[in-house]
Amino acid sequence: MSHAVQGADAPAPAPRPGLIGPTLGLLQREVIRFVRQRSRLFSALGQPVLFWLLLGSGFGASFTPPGARPRSRLQRAEDHRAGR
């Protein structure tokens, strides 16, 4: 009766079949790459904020009810703080 002892010459465990293992490996690689490259980090966070600001300022007048006079962002903020 021979007992198998795992040592330096023991074969590596077989990878699990399916897509979970490779997917997690790729995810880990991309997250590490993303965090290490600051330009990616800033562009990934900055681009949506820039689009929100540009689109929000462009479409702001579109959401003004008919008959109401358009107000600036500063006037809307003052009204919000005053509870109007």
Image (cartoon, grey):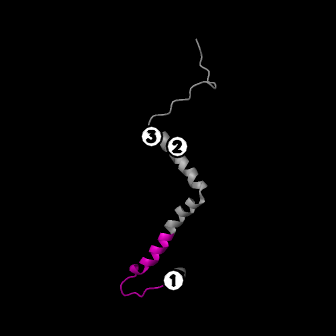
Q: Considering only order in the chain, which callout, 2 or 1, is on the residue closer to the N terminus?
A: 2
| Residue drawn at x 59%, y 19% as measured from the top left | 4
Q: Amino acid at mark 3?
A: Leu
Residue in front for this viewpoint, 23 or 9: 9
Q: Which residue is mark 3?
A: 19
In the figure, 44 relative to 59: above or below? above
Residue displayed at 60% across by 16% down: 3
Tell me where residue 2 sits by quadrant: top right
Residue 16 among magenta residues: no
Q: What residue type is disc 2 on?
A: Gly
| The N terminus, quarter of image | top right
In screen coordinates, is 40 left or right of 64?
A: right
Separation of disc 1 and disc 2 at Cα? 51 Å
Q: Position of residue 46 (x, y in %)?
A: 54, 66
| Spot occupied by residue 19 in the image (x, y as percentages of width and height) | 44, 40
Residue 78, picture quadrant: bottom right
Q: Amino acid at mark 1?
A: Asp
Q: Residue at x 46, y 77 (%)?
A: 57
Task: Check disc 2 and report its element: helix, strand or loop.
Answer: helix
Q: Which residue is mark 2?
A: 25
Q: Secondary structure at mark 1?
A: helix
**How crowded is the residue under tag 3: few (<14 C-alpha within 10 Å), some, or many (20+)?**
few
Of badges 1 and 3, nearer the viewer stands 3
Check residue 73 for magenta coloring: yes
Q: Which sits earlier in the primary sequence, circle 3 or circle 2?
A: 3
**7 or 75, which is in the foreground?**
7
Q: CA distance from mark 1 to mark 3?
A: 54 Å
Q: What is the magenta range? A: 50-78
> CA gap, disc 3 to disc 2?
10 Å
Image vertical order of residue 1 relative to residue 8, above or below: above
Query: Does residue 69 sit above or below 44 in this rendering?
Result: below
Name the disc covering residue 79, or none. Answer: 1
